[in-house]
Amino acid sequence: MHRMTTAEATVASLIAHGISTIYALPGVHNDALFDALFKAGDLIRTVHARHEQTAGYMALGAALGTGKPQAYAVVPGPGLLNSATALLTAYGTNAPVLALIGQITQSAIGRGYGLLHEIRDQAGIIERLVDFSARIRAPAEAPGVIAAALRAMQVGRPGPAAIECAMDVWGRSAPMPAVAPPEPTAPARFDEDALSEAAKRLGSAARILIVAGGGAQDAAAEVTELSQMLQAPVLAFRRGRGVLDSRNPFSVTLPLGHELWREAEVVLGIGTRLFFGFQHWGVDDDLTVIRVDADPEEPERFCAPAVALIGQAKPILRRLIDALGRHNQARASRREEMIERQSKMRSRLQKLSPQVAFLDAIRTELGEDGIFVDEVTQIGFAARLAYPVYKPRTFISPGYQDALGWGYATALGVQDARRDVPVLSISGDGGFLFTGSDIATAMRHRIPLVCIIFNDGAYGNVRRIQEEHYGNRLIACDLSNPDFVRFAESFGAAAERAHDPRQLGAALRRAFKRRDQPSIIEVPVGPLPSPWDFVFMPRVRGR
Ligand SMILES: Cc1ncc(C[n+]2csc(CCOP(=O)(O)OP(=O)(O)O)c2C)c(N)n1
Ligand SMILES: [Mg+2]
C-alpha cells in the first residue's frame, strides 16, 4: 500500500487500461488531475486543444481511427457543454470515448451556491448523454469506476462514458493497493440454434444483400468471405464504408443498394441500423431480415428479424461462415452482373461529376492506407456515394448526427492517433470555421493533418434548398470568410489555393510530404449539383 491521490489513482488506472493520451483543456477544477498527468511522465501524453469541442472531437477521432478507447478531460459546466456535441456524436457512432469532467467541491454539489462553473444536476445531464456515468467520490473508488467505465465502453454496444470528480476529491489521498490490470473479458457465447438457422436461411436463398454498418469495421475479412460465398453485394453508406474494398464489384453504396434492396430475398445486416432500408425503402413479407448486432435491443427496433445473432460481428461471422460450409447451395457467379451494374451506376453518378473529379484527385494522392475524414459538405455528401474506400477505418464519417463542424477537430484526433498514415480532412467554408482555430493545436502538437476547405462563400447546402424549394428566398446562408490561406499561414501552417482537380492533386502531393506540420488547401468552388436524389430514394417494397 502507498498513498495516492484520486487523480493519481485515476491516471494509473487509465494507463493500466491502455489509454496513452488525454485530449484536454485544463482549469482550476482539474488542477490535481493535470498534476497527476504531469507526474505520470511518458506513460501518458496530454494533448491540449483550444476549445473543449475540439478536445472531445479529438478523442472521438482517435477512437474511430484506432477502434480503441480514448479519453478527454474538461472542466465542469461550460467545459462539459462545450464538449457535448462530441459526446453526442460519440454516442451516435458507438465510439468508446471517456469524458473526465470536473465538479465543484463535493460538499457544495446540488446546493446552488453559484460557484465557478456550477451547473444544475451535472450528473443528470451526463447520465442522459451516455449509457455509463458515475462520480468518483473518494480515492479508493477511482480504479473501480475507471474499470467499470472502460468495460461499459467496450462490452455490448460500444459507446462513450462520462465520469465526474469534485475538485477537492481529485487531490485527496489515501493508502491504496497497486492498480490492478483489467480483467480479461469472458469469451463470447454463441446461440448455436440461431447460428444454424441463419446459415440455413442464407444458404438456401438466391438473392442476398449484405448491409455493413460501423459495427462491421472489425470484420472486414469475414464480410469479404461471406460476400464471396453467398455472391452477395455489400451495401455501405457512411460508417460501413471500407468493410468491403470498393475495388471489389460487390461493394456498393446507397443508389445501387436501393435497387438491390428491392430485389433481395434476404438482407443480412451487420452492425447497422438498416435505417435507409427500414425508414425509406420498405419491407414486405417476401423479405427475410437477419441481423448481427452487438446490441440486443437493436434488431427489434424497426421490425422483428427472422434471426438475430447478438455479439461482436467478427467471431459471429467466423462461426456463420463455418456453418454455411454445410448449408450453402452451389451458386452461379454474379461478378459480371455486378461489374455491369457498377458501370451503369458510375454513369448515373456523373451528375455529380464536379465533386467526383475532386474526389478522384484525393483518392489518387491519399494512397492505399490514407484516411479520409468526412464532413457535412457537398464533397462529403458525394464522397459517401462515390469515393472509393479500400480498407476498414479509412473513411471516418459522423453517422446520423451529421454535426457540421465535426470534421477538422475530429480529423486532428484521427491524425494524432494514426501518425503512421496520411489523414485528409475535408470541410466546407461553413463547417471549417467551427474549429478552424485549432490549426493552433495542430501547430502546437505537430499534427501533420491536411485539410481541404471547399469554399463557396455559403452554407451551400442550405442555400441550394432555399433556391430550389423556397422560391429563392435566401436567408442566413451567405457567409463572409477570411482569406483562408493567410488565416492558416498566420498560425505558421503551410497553405495554398487550388482552383481545379489537377491543381488540387499537386497541392496534396506537396502537403502529404510535410510530416511535421499541418497543411491547409483552399479550393474556391461555385454552386455544386445536388446529391440528394441519390440519398433519399422512394419506397420500393411494402406499402
Ligand atoms: C451542428 C449543425 N448545425 C447546422 C447544421 C445544418 N447544416 C447542414 S449543411 C449546412 C451548411 C454547410 O455549409 P458548408 O460547411 O460551407 O458546406 P457546403 O454545403 O457549403 O458545401 C448546415 C448549416 C448541421 N448539419 N449541423
Ligand atoms: Mg460552403
Image: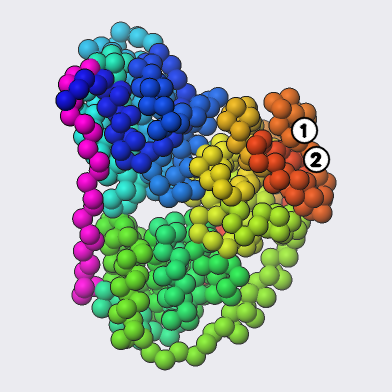
Residue 497 tag number: 2
Q: Quadrant of the N terminus?
A: top left
| Rendered position, 8 above or below 401 | above
Would you place residue 439 above or below residue 241 in this image? above
Residue 390: image quadrant is bottom right
Which kind of residue does numbered mark 1 sit on? Answer: Val
Q: Which region is colored magenta?
A: 173-194
Q: Secondary structure at mark 1?
A: helix
- The structure residue drawn at horizontal position 53% and vertical position 50%, both measured from the top left corner, is 396
Picture residue at 21% right of the left edge, 73% below the top: 192
Q: How does the figure colour the protein chain or chains? A: rainbow
Q: Is residue 56 above or below residue 511?
A: above
Residue identified by numbered label 1: 485
Say whether residue 189 is magenta.
Answer: yes
Check contact, mark 2 vs mark 1: CB within 8 A.
yes
Amino acid type, label 2: Arg
Q: Quadrant of ligand 1?
A: top right
**From mark 2 to mark 1, how far is it between C-alphas?**
7 Å
The residue carrying mark 2 has its beta carbon less than 8 Å from ligand 2: no
